[in-house]
Amino acid sequence: MPLQNRVDPFGAIHAVAARGLFTGNRGVFHDPATKALLRRRWSTKAWIVCDLVHPTGTTREPMGRNAPGGGAGWTELFFLDEVTALAAGHRPCFYCRRAAAKDFAAAFARGQGCGTRSAAEIDCILHRQRLASGGSPPILTAAEVRGLPDGAMVAYGPNAFAVNGGKLLPWAFTGYGAARASCRGLPPEATLITPPVTVAALANGYRPVWHASVAHKT
């Protein structure tokens, strides 16, 4: 039976069999004895997205006892792709994805009109905007949706869509579906899923990693 460790664009955590391109964490919030999540869904404001392969080659048992002293260690989460992780409010890890993290931090700062932002500052700003940590999602008009950068995600009702090349790609745990051409004929309102500060980083040059299914849908 799948563990409850797959994250959707809204930041909710599910038990599904489909695999993803990235792992990551929000701290420790699982019981290693039962491999079940605790009631909380994070224990730190540092929500990161990491490579599946650790730089040192270290392997981990998902939701096991991975801390040096035999404790829980961090709770392993998994994402379809980086676009999904960014929508959920995560940002690249400075340890295992340092180049991506530096690019994101630079684009994040440009989006805020400032010189630099530390990882801690980025985490605090993101935490106020993440849907899963209580952020209020902005409501967008159809014109505003058409103006979003590639990699931003919106919702129509319970369904998430990613912006790519002027089209909306429906999201699923297994990949992206057929595109809505040119974002035409949209409902009058959508909900922005990706934190606004991350949308600004995307608009200022950050290029996230997409799932391979995108190549067949755009």
Image (cartoon, grey):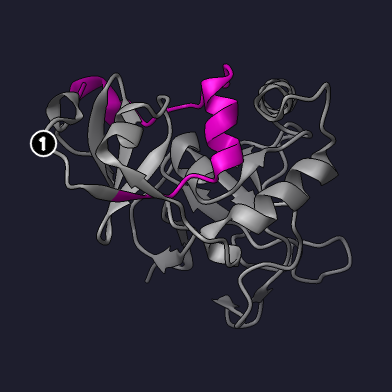
Give, as a three-letter code, the residue at label 1. Gly
Residue 156: in magenta span = no
**Is residue 60 visible in the rendered structure shown here?**
no
* Quarter placement of the N terminus: bottom left
Q: Residue at x 68, y 20 (%)?
A: 103
The residue carrying mark 1 is: 185
Q: How many marks?
A: 1
Residue 211: in magenta span = yes
**Is residue 110 visible in the rendered structure shown here?**
yes
Position of 44 with respect to 134 (left or right) is right
Start-end of magenta stretch: 190-218
Q: Tell me if mark 1 has few (under 14), some (14-19) or many (20+) residues whose alpha carbon lies within 10 angstroms of its own.
A: few
Does 50 appear above or below 126? above
Q: Position of residue 69 (x, y in %)?
A: 89, 67
Q: Residue at x 42, y 51 (%)?
A: 9
Identify which residue, 190 or 40, lies in the foreground. Answer: 190
Q: Residue at x 47, y 47 (%)?
A: 79
Q: Outermost residue toward the right?
A: 69
* Quarter placement of the C terminus: top left
Q: Position of residue 92 (x, y in %)?
A: 66, 35
Q: Residue at x 54, y 46 (%)?
A: 195
